[in-house]
Amino acid sequence: MEKIKMNTIVEMDGDEMTRILWKMIKDELLAPYIELNTEYYDLGLKHRDETDDRVSVEAAEAIKKYRVGVKCATITPNAQRVEEYNLKQMWKSPNGTIRAILDGTVFRAPILVNGISPVVKNWKKPITIARHAYGDVYKATEMRVPEGKAELVFTDRDGKETRETVYDYECPGVLQGMFNKDSSIKSFAHSCFKYALSTKQDLWFSAKDTISKKYDQTFKLIFQDIFEKEYKEDFEKNGITYFYTLIDDAVARVIRSEGGYIWACKNYDGDVMSDMVSTAFGSLAMMTSVLVSPDGNYEYEAAHGTVTRHYYRYLKGETTSTNPIATVFAWTGALKKRGELDGNEKLTAFAEKLEKACIDTVESGLMTKDLVGLWEGEAKAVALSSEEFIKAIKAQLEKAL
């Protein structure tokens, strides 16, 4: 068959075992069928160090230019990694850098396979978590304090002070101050509404405004105002709904539901609930992740890390059985979005066939070791190495093409 032509997407290479899988996926599942047109950025830790992490910023700016990017998993270094890689400093997460530049919201959804049942038996469709990855406890200021009075003090641009007593401590304790801002909450809301429309799924948003009458209520009111003014009509046209509920009510509803919607959460709630949902559906190796900016830029990646343990075994020449599906789906997500934006139906159709080939391969009983323990299907589960599994996907893809 003639190779499918495509416009440019931004390709961001990564680290360790996922970097190995990245090349296998390109060589076996993409390059034979597509004239891969990518602007390449090496976000491997060594190259980030060589460029003083300028490469992460350049990659984010490229996504703004081309609107679609696909990223391999990368190392966020700790003290041990600084020593291991002989780094100049402890560089920040490239995900955080890209997210800040794109002002994006992270959407994570499980990949469902017949034969691997969710722990919650009534879940039939994916539940997508939208996490507002800004502020809150992740940027909080904290203190251990002795006896004494704690106050919240705000000084406006004119020098006027506003004070509120937090607590008058009769014994030692802890104190925390956290923040958010309207501009970030508005970007979060726009990203959620646009993603719901693009996927034609209902959108839920949950917080705790009954307790947090200023902080959480600001989220609630901004979401409602933007929805009423800019999205309500389009939601109605597409037959989808938006509603707000308290976080504890949302948890109860989620457990009782069949799935098939987007659940938008504040930063901490989204951090916790995305892990809960991914684990309950089966495996973090079967979880997609896409960063969506309010002005319509998209960055796709796997939700998991660089699989360090397998990489060290790979370096020793040992055979590994690392699940590549989430990384394949990062590529197919980017290719589908590129095809959708450009009206390139051949590219979109190819990406959909590759996704189906991944699912069909697992459902036939061929899978990586991480899925064998979860398998409940009729076919006998056969554990394959990473390379064998990718070749099995290729065989399924060839049939579909």
Image (cartoon, rainbow, N blue to C red):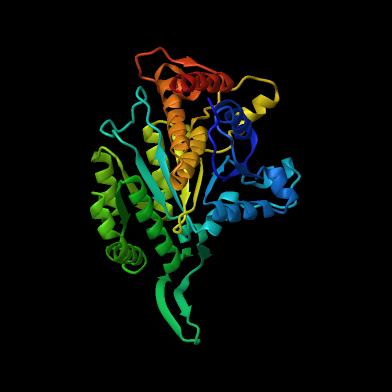
Task: Please say whether residue 314 is visible from this viewpoint.
Answer: yes
Looking at the image, residue 97 lies above or below residue 308: below
Q: Is residue 226 above or below residue 389?
A: below
Q: Of 379 and 151, which appears nearest the observer?
A: 379
Asked where in the image residue 52 lies, by quadrant, the reply is bottom right
Where is residue 226? Give x, y as percent: 33, 64
Q: What is the quadrant of residue 183 in the picture?
A: bottom left
In the displayed structure, would residue 241 be above or below residue 176? Answer: above
Q: Nearer the viewer, residue 68 or 94?
A: 68
Q: Is residue 181 visible?
A: no
Give the number of marks: 0
39 relative position to 373: left or right: right
**Extreme residue toward the top, this view:** 380
User: Residue 119 appears at what percent x and percent y?
Assistant: 33, 31
- Nearest the viewer among 392 and 140 is 392
Tell me where residue 214 appears, x and y as whole percent.
34, 69
Q: Quadrant of residue 58?
A: bottom right
Residue at 50%, 22% (x, y): give it. Answer: 393
385 lies left or right of 272: right
Q: Farthest residue to the front: give it.
A: 2
x, y percent for residue 317: 69, 21
Front residue of this view, candidates 115 and 37: 37
